[in-house]
Image: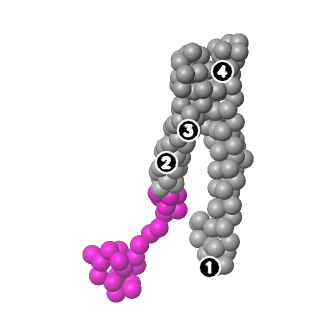
Amino acid sequence: RLLKAQKSIHPDDPRGFGHWSMAEMHEEMSTVFAAFRWVSFVFGGLALFAGVIGIMNIMLITIKERTRELGVRRALGATPANIVVQIMVETLTLTVLAGLLGGILGVFALEALDTYLVSAEDNGIFRHPHVTLDVLLTALTTMTVLGAFAGVLPALRALRVQPVEALRT
C-alpha cells in the first residue's frame, strides 16, 4: 500500500504491483509435465498394445495359410512342442524386429524434429527432444513380453491342425 501511495497508484488496482513466485511456477510446470508424461505413457502403451494385436493377427493369418505345411510336419513326426516353439520363435522374431524398427524410426523422427527446432531458432522448453536408452529398452522389453503372450493363441491354433485334415486341403 505504501508503494502504491508513493507511486500514485490506486490502492485497489491489482495490476499496480504484483509478485511472481518461482516456487509456484515450478509447481505449475511440474504438474503440466507430469500430465504430459502420463498422456505419453498412455498413448505409448496403446501403441504397443496395437502393435502386439497386429502381430497376433499376422500370426493367426500365417497359421491359417500354412495349415498344409503344419499338417505335413505333424505327419512327419513333429511334436506339439516343436510346433509351439516354431510359432513362438516366429512371433518373437517379428515382434523384436518391429520393435527395433519402431525405435529406430522414433529416434530419427526426434532428430528431425530437433533439426527443425534448431533451424526455427526455438529456444523454448522443447529444444533438443530425445528418448533415453532405458526408455527404448523398456519399450522393447515390454513389447517382447507382450509378443510372447500374443504368440500363444496362434501356437494353440497351430496345435489344433490335424495332419489328416491338413493333407486333404
Give the magenta range: 1-29
Graded by Cα atoms within 10 Å as few (under 14), some (14 to 19) or many (20 or more), the crowding at tag 4 reads: some
Label of residue 58 in the image:
3
In the rendering, at what x and y percent does residue 19 appear? 44, 69
| Element type where label 1 sits in the image | loop
Of labels 3 and 4, the one closer to you: 4
Of labels 4 and 2, the one closer to you: 4
What is the count of numbered marks?
4
Residue at image mark 4 = 72
Between the C-alphas of marks 1 and 3, the distance is: 42 Å
**Image height of 3 relative to 83, above or below:** below
| Viewer-proximal residue among 4 and 133 | 133
Residue at image mark 1 = 120
Nearer-N-terminus badge (4/2): 2
| Element type where label 4 sits in the image | helix
Residue at image mark 2 = 43
Q: Is residue 20 magenta?
A: yes
In the rendering, at what x and y percent does residue 55 appear? 57, 38
Between the C-alphas of marks 3 and 2, the distance is: 22 Å
Q: Are marks 1 and 4 in contact (CB under 8 Å)?
A: no
In the rendering, at what x and y percent does residue 10 appear? 29, 82
Identity of the residue drawn at 27% across and 75% down: 12
Nearer-N-terminus badge (1/2): 2
Between the C-alphas of marks 4 and 2, the distance is: 43 Å
Nearer-N-terminus badge (3/2): 2
Of labels 1 and 4, the one closer to you: 4
Of labels 3 and 2, the one closer to you: 3
Q: Amino acid at mark 2?
A: Phe
Nearer-N-terminus badge (1/4): 4
Q: Amino acid at mark 1?
A: Ala
Q: Amino acid at mark 3?
A: Ile
